[in-house]
Image (spheres, rainbow, N blue to C red):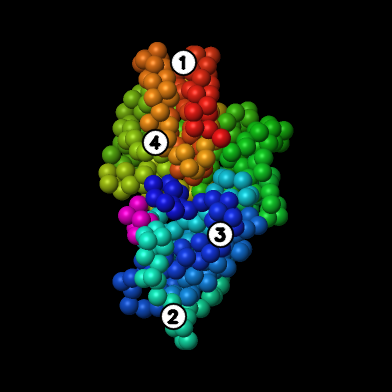
Amino acid sequence: MGRLFGTDGARGIAVTELTCELAMQIGRAAALVLTQHSSHRPKILIGKDTRISSDILEAAMCAGICSVGADAEILGVVPTPAVAYLVKESGADAGVMISASHNSVEFNGIKLFSSTGYKLSDEIEAEIEALILDHPEKVQLVSGTEVGRITYYQDAAEEYISHIAASIQTKPEGLRVALDCANGSSSATAKELFTRLGAEVLLIHAEPDGTNINKNCGSTHMEDLMEFVVANKCDIGLAFDGDADRCLAVDETGELVDGDKLIAIAAKAYKDQGRLKKDAVVVTVMSNLGFTYFAKKHGIKMITANVGDRYVLEKMLDGGYHIGGEQSGHIIFLDEATTGDGQLSGAKILEILKSSGCKMSELASVMDQFPQVMINVKIPNSRKENWKNDSEITDLIDRKETELGEAGRILVRESGTEPLIRVMIEGRDFNQINAMAMEIADKINERVGR
């Protein structure tokens, strides 16, 4: 990826890494690049999550956008997919979401959307990076009456909620649903949306205070929801991340239903109804081996993309597919959304659950999961990519792949959003793959870790 943007926008420790100055520069450069062919005064929408640093980065972005003659329209706290939807629906020239998604509160990020509601391509992001880092002299500031205005979008959350509600034909009336809002963006929308759909809604972690986003809650910390669903006799639990573009579920017994299984549930339901385009879904290289067996069993073509919902989306657009996603819970229903949408995904699963007459555990049994071990190794930013050229690391990985053979697989990759190397191993024997993962992770930490 580029020098500022990873797999999901620009991200870093707010204020010290993702500085206010950098946010202003991104605002300026993005406004110029994304609106360079506009014949009118450009308008850019800005949404944000609930973390304490989002307000000041929003202010910096607005200053940058307006300083080059574009208008900034503030959406307030909304999910990331709401920005994508409203940009396209309102005819705005571009959109910005200020969020670090599932990361902890000290992080923040900037995600950019084009006028079509899609995340930017690598090429466009590279053009914005070049303007900031290589050719800042090309950024022309305006003055006087040419300066942009800051306005406030009315009813942004309501328009988004109405859009999702209209996408669901079979309402999940009567289902008892627990929602974990991660003290993030879905705190502003989830209760109203799922109540409007007819579900009996119970909320946890829906009281953001600026500091508690993703803190031991949401889609990266499922323990509270698992216990809550069982204790309150819920039919299902849904967990979102900080900006609500992810969704994971919990069945009525308290068992986790991850993104792979949610995609499998949706794909099978669509195929059974004759609605699965090209009988295919798009997943990533991180998807569990069990998904491969599920797809073969049900005659579903499995298209594999690189990690990152932008790469899933590219495969979907190129091939004409309409369901895709990641194990982490980024799921794209392309007929209704241009990006991963946690609340849309949750609503779709509730629709399938209601229509089936089954329990959630029965739906989730459609796919068996292979044991999978994931270990994250922290690395300094200065040592990124170094491990790929370290023979002690690569030789060890090769030996373990040979030892594992066709009984599993090893995937070692750098995170696109955090300073981490992820070591993932799958296989039928948990003890074997766990020992392998620990050995590889220890070697990486020894050679290039902090």
Position of 128 with respect to 79 (left or right) is left
Residue 359, quarter of picture? top right
Residue 411 tag number: none
Mark 2: amino acid:
Val
Find disc 3 in the rendering and name its residue. 19
Labels 4 & 2 near each other (Cβ < 8 A): no
Inspect this view and state whether residue 255 appears: yes
What is the magenta segment's predominant secondary structure?
helix
Whichever of callouts 3 and 1 sits on the residue coming sooner in the sequence is: 3
Whichever of callouts 4 and 1 sits on the residue coming sooner in the sequence is: 4
**Label 4 SS:** strand
Tell me the distance, in whole angstroms, between the alpha carbons under discs 4 and 3. 32 Å
Q: What stretch is highlighted in magenta?
A: 121-128
Residue beneath the point at 51% across and 20% down: 439
Tell me the distance, in whole angstroms, between the alpha carbons under discs 3 and 2. 23 Å
Residue beneath the point at 49% across and 18% down: 436
Residue 70, quarter of picture? bottom left
- Give above or below for 39 relative to 172: below
Mark 3: amino acid:
Thr
